[in-house]
Amino acid sequence: MINSEVKPIINSSSGTPSRKYVLISGCRDEAEHMQVTIDSVVAQTVLPTKWIIIDDNSVDATPQILAEAASKYPFIEVIRNNREGGRRVGPAVIEAFYVGYQTINPEEYDYVCKFDMDLDIPTKYFEILMERMEANPRIGTCSGKAYFKDNQGELISEKCGDEASVGMTKFYRVKCFQQIGGFVREVMWDGIDCHRCRMLGWIAVSWDEPDLRFIHLRPMGSSHKGLLTGRMRHGFGQYFMGTGLLYLLASSIYRMTRPPILVGGLGILIGYLKSMWQQKPRYEDLEFRQFLRRYQWNCLLKGKTKATQELNESQADKWMKSENAVT
């Protein structure tokens, strides 16, 4: 259900929807992949208004590559974050994002995107996302789908659900991003955000289409300490977020059937059970965790597609009330 009275922001000089978007990318020692990412962004049919890249104290050729890119493209701004220590994941990714985010006035943009530096995106990627969001004002965050290449060079889907924007390219309507309170600085930030969107009546979605499929040059969950470590970290993230054991078990079994066979799903399950055994803390928002459990039970009973559709429909009034309150 869409509020037909809500219109996209219009550029008064051209009569076309405003498409001012900012990319914010944190990186550390990404020299191996980042030139591919830079080339794919500067080839976009709609270029970003600004691209802020936070160099998190890299010690490889990253600073030189970024300096060259910034000298060629005026919309690229590089920030050196002189953080001590080695490569970190999880909360540190969001810490780097906020180093860049705090330098902008979000009100000057229509969209904001947390964008990783190990991606190869199609040329119309951002144009298509903005077209979809203009067509449906309830879409708060969206993305395409991630693929990676196996040892034989074959493209393998990372199998991210349609009910979420993927963590490596979180494209947000600024208004939605502000309403959900941004990203939490914990491992499961990229799951909590989409569920918070639905709590407020927004829609989170991703599409698996040729023009929206991108290559993840470093596959999801492939921690710099090893694939198993990355998947165990994801299991802890699911526990922290509030995911129920039965739902996690079903998800892990499914992941065992996807490359890497057995190891991926088993790592997630081990990480979750280890966190449960150690009684690690969970996301403190009880209302959120209850909302999440209800949704996950419906996913188990009805399938994720139907459960998500029903939830989005039932939350439409909440979104409309929020929109009417600010317009």
Image (cartoon, rainbow, N blue to C red):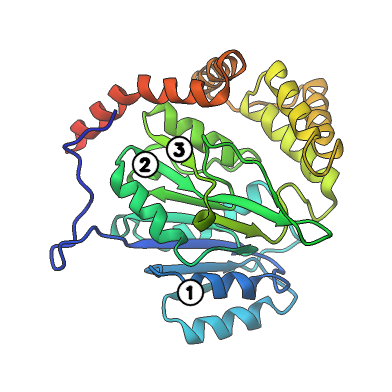
Q: Is residue 37 above or below residue 232?
A: below
Q: SS at mark 1? A: loop
Mark closest to the chain's N terminus, 1 or 2: 1
Q: Residues within 10 Å of mark 3 (few under 14, many from 20)?
A: many
* Viewer-proximal residue among 61 and 88: 61
**Residue 276 badge:** none
Residue named by callout 3: 204
As drawn, 262 above or below 86: above
The earlier-in-sequence mark between 3 and 2 is 2
**Residue position for label 2:** 176
- Kind of residue at disc 3: Ala
Q: Quadrant of the N terminus?
A: top left
- The image position of residue 3, as x and y in percent, is 22, 33
Residue drawn at point x = 43 percent, y = 60 percent: 126
Residue shown at the point (19%, 36%) measured from the top left:
4
Q: Is 65 on the left-hand or right-hand side of 316?
A: right
Q: Secondary structure at mark 3?
A: strand
**How crowded is the residue under tag 1: few (<14 C-alpha within 10 Å), some, or many (20+)?**
few
Q: Nearer the viewer, residue 203 or 240?
A: 203
Left or right of 287? Residue 134 is left
Q: Which residue was labeled with disc 1? A: 43
Q: Is residue 189 visible?
A: yes
x and y percentages locating residue 17 in the rendered image: 23, 57
